Image: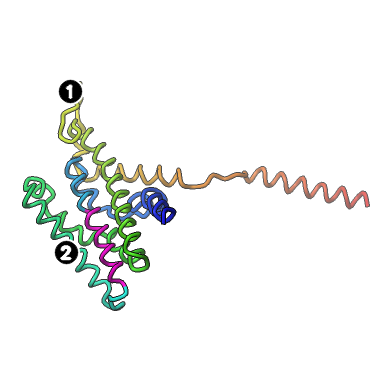
Amino acid sequence: MINNIREAFFRNLWTENQVVRQILGICSILAVTNLMVNTLVMGLGLMFVISLSSLTISALRNYIPHRVRMIVQTFIIASYVILVDIFLKANYPELSRALGPYIGLIITNCIIMGRAEAFAQKNTPFISMLDGLFAGLGYTIVLMMISFVRELLGFGSIFGVNVNFLQLDTWTIMVMPPAAFFIIGVMIWVATALSTPKQTSQPAVQALSRGQQALANQQVKAGN
């Protein structure tokens, strides 16, 4: 069990990170990563929805007819999204207005459907819940990194607190959605470069070794 939890943790945070490795959930990156507060709320909401929906779907996996499983999964996910939306509107109305329709669009987030279909349908409820939680955590960490850069360079603040003590010029482009594309592109490039195994032998060295072997064979034949 411990090994399964550890494997699910590292898999979702790095080796199969939903954003930088599988390129999922990109739409929300454009919408909510201009401010870190909005990003944190969005990430926590998704973690809540994906973990509990994975738990529920896994618990009901043997009772859901295979032909209608996608409809049932969407219904379960939508139920938890509605809870998050009601909670934000009741307790944090300003955040709810700032996020607008994007909380409701968690229903269509392909990360949640992907974990439900690829993992929760085939594994036990507890490990499925942890898999969803870690997948949401990996998604949230990437979004927080993007929003940190965008808010710092675009507004000169972090979590709404002004840190631009030197009164440096802010970058207007960082406030605009295309900035998220630039940053996520760099992050995907770095993650791919770090994950690609290095070549242990060079073609020139291999060719030289083959030439030396052929010369040695010829010398052996000549000696015979």
Residue at 22% in and 33% down: 152
Element marked by disc 2: helix
Looking at the picture, how far across and down is residue 190, in whole percent? 40, 42
Q: Is residue 125 above or below residue 90?
A: below
Looking at this view, name the residue that lies furthest to the front.
Answer: 1
Residue that badge 1 annotates: 167
Instruction: Give the residues in magenta.
Output: 46-61
The image quadrant of residue 116 is bottom left
- In front of the other: 9 or 15: 9
Residue 54 lies within the magenta run:
yes
Task: Tell me how the rendering is colored.
Answer: rainbow
Looking at the picture, how far across and down is residue 203, in whole percent? 63, 46
Residue that badge 2 annotates: 79
Residue 82 lies within the magenta run:
no
Residue at 31% in and 77% down: 66
Q: Which image quarter is the N terminus in?
A: bottom left
Looking at this view, name the residue that lies furthest to the top.
Answer: 166
Q: Is residue 68 above or below residue 17?
A: below
The image quadrant of residue 77 is bottom left
**Dot in front, 1 or 2:** 2
Looking at the picture, how far across and down is residue 132, in whole percent? 30, 57
